[in-house]
Image (cartoon, grey):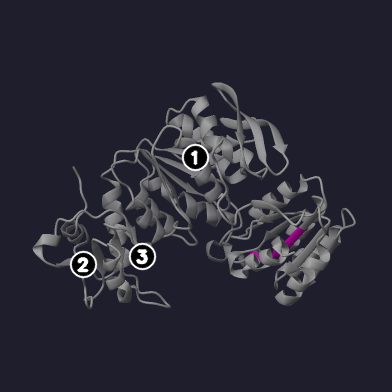
Amino acid sequence: MYTLTPQKIAEITGGTYIGDNSQRDVPVMGAVRDSNDVKSGNLFVCIQGARTDGHLFAKSAFQAGAACCLAEKELQEADGAYVIVPSTLEAIKTLAAYHRRQFAIPVVGITGSVGKTTTKELIAATLSAKFCVLKTEKNLNNELGVPLTLLSLNQNHEAAVIEMGISDFGEMSRLAQMVVPDIFVMTCIGYSHTKELGDLSGVLAAKTEAFEHMNYDGVAVLNGDDRLLRAYKSDIKKVLFGQNEYNDFRVENINIQGISSIAMDIVSSDGRFRAEIPAYGSHLAALAAAAAAVGRLLKLTDEEISAGLSIYSHVEGRSNISVENGISIINDCYNATPDSVKAALTSLSQLPCRRVAILGDMLNLGSFSDELHFEIGSFAAKHGVNLLLCHGEKALFIAEGFNAANANGGLAQHYVNFDDLLDAVPKKIKKGDAVLVKASRGMRFERVLPVLRSD
């Protein structure tokens, strides 16, 4: 049986083993980069960051139970075995690629300009009705996070669901070479990272780099409601999901039950079945079709797919909703792109109350930024937002777009200073309101939440 050990790590990475002979064959299980996350048997990866040097925490990692460290230099006061390599980042990717290939289980890769994490959670929940599933945790979806996730694979896992996020050309190829997806899900092509990728065609080209690194009989599960994905030509087998009738898996008879759940029929050539997701957000319906497509490809029954979807739960900061002091607070401030903001506003529009949106800048949109922010404001006005509060240099265009549309007599207010926005919130919000909070992560709009929750 395959077992990862310090000696094996040195062989795979071409590194130099440091330690005594008794430690060479100690089992290594999982990998972390934060010494606070170390569990017994872990590999601790020493990363030289902009603000701190992981090598300084090797001793505490060993004290917490690390079986081995991966380092770029000699470790002072080392209490265990370690492997020295020229680059820990490159070594961890090499190691993860090798480790993944030792497991003959279905691996699902997920990408897209919006909805990656939600789709990952829906698919993982669905597959858990039949399999023991490894899934990406937190935001570990980049060139460090993906290998850390893959190195958590163990003999108990029967399937893996790996989120894959990129911001530039070439990144997806490097991720896919490690993941080697059997099924690759793409949620949409939108204006995310267009500062680096240029335009939607560039986003499509960057995301689809993964197809060159899939298993030979791999399947692409694509959002057929997305014009570019529907039209994309490839030798890879395609399965389309969405709401339109030409999709292989589609949703019908959507029933939004306030803030508590959403139910829908999932329809394919094999028939239809009813499913319910215990969460808020109309965007979940189409993504449930993606989860059903993956489930069916992996031989789950309709009953198993429905049971899996029924245990889905939101990730913190992504459409989490709570009722506090008579206000429905929608915490969606983890990140923001034009597509995700529109989805959030659409869900907000379906609530039968006064609807308030607190929005900030969407970052990394390049030359499209001003136009796309203005468009969001217009979209909000036309989708029943009664009050719009904004902060950020580009968010000024959101307010202008809202006021220009003036679709429902609502009001938009832009605040130059964030503290002025915070001061205004308790004065503007009323009991019975539903309040959406959303902006790019760099805007730190989670600072609004305590003000909304205070008495």
Farthest residue, direction top = 271
Q: Secondary structure at mark 2?
A: strand
Mark 3–mark 1 Cα distance, whole angstroms, equals 26 Å
Q: Residues within 10 Å of mark 1 (few under 14, many from 20)?
A: many
Q: Are marks 3 and 1 in contact (CB under 8 Å)?
A: no
Front residue of 150 and 31: 31
The image quarter containing residue 131 is: top left
For numbered disc 3, what is the local secondary structure?
A: loop
Left-right relation of 415 to 282: right
Residue located beneath label 3 in the image: 33
Residue furthest out toward the front: 455
Mark 3 / mark 2, whichever is N-terminal: 3
Figure quadrant of residue 278: top right
Quarter holding the N terminus is top left
Taking the spot 76% from the left edge, 44% from the top edge, the residue there is 350
At which x and y percent is residue 218?
Answer: 39, 38
Q: Classify the position of the C terminus by image quarter.
A: bottom right
Residue farthest to the left, as pictured: 21
What residue sits right under mark 1 in the picture?
125
| Residue at left offset 71%, top offset 38% | 256
- Amino acid type of the residue tagged 1 in the rendering: Ala
Q: Earlier in the sequence, mark 2 or mark 1?
A: 2
Residue 111 horizontal side relative to residue 79, left or right: right
The verdict on residue 83 being magenta is no
* Residue 328 coordinates in the image, percent (x, y): 73, 53
The span from disc 2 to disc 1 (Cα, nearest Å) is 37 Å
Question: Alpha-carbon neighbours of circle 3 within 10 Å: few (<14), some, or many (≥20)?
Answer: many
Q: Which residues are magenta?
A: 357-362
Does any portion of residue 244 appear in the rendered image?
no
Give the main secondary structure of the magenta stretch.
strand
Compare residues 140 and 216 and report the one nearer the observer: 140
Q: Which residue is mark 2?
A: 82
